[in-house]
Amino acid sequence: MESYRTEIRIDKDGELHLSQIPFHEGEKVEVLVFSLAKSSNDAKYALRGEPVRYEDATAPVSENDWEAAG
């Protein structure tokens, strides 16, 4: 499935107009609309979208550290 991403502003009256998209006339597409505005939930998930980095992820874990995590 081919996808295409763009950012545009909603016209007054809540209308959305797309142009120059890489699909052909008559082709069926699925449209999902997400707001780019920050929501109140963003503070709860402050690290969402940040890269994940593991340092020495395959190192053995001591018995004391293992029990502290549980």
Image (spheres, rainbow, N blue to C red):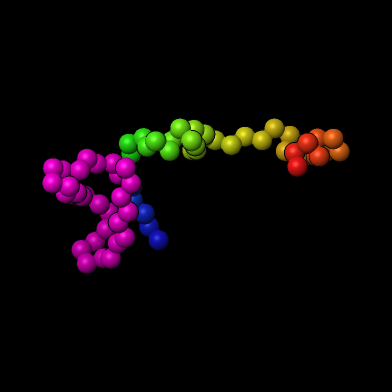
Q: Which quarter of the image is occupied by the C terminus?
A: top right
The residue nearer to you, when weighing 25 against 62, is 62
User: Residue visible at 13% across and 42% down?
Assistant: 12
Q: Main secondary structure of the magenta part?
A: loop
Residue 34, position in %: x, y?
Answer: 33, 46
Q: Quadrant of residue 58?
A: top right
Image position of 15 (left or right of 6): left
Image position of 54 (left or right of 21): right
Residue 11, position in %: x, y?
Answer: 15, 43
Residue 58 colored magenta?
A: no
Residue 21 colored magenta?
A: yes
Residue projecting furthest to the right: 63
Q: What stretch of residues is rendered in magenta? A: 6-35
The residue nearer to you, when weighing 68 against 57, is 68
User: Residue visible at 43% across and 35% down?
Assistant: 42
Q: Does residue 38 lie above or below 6 as drawn?
A: above
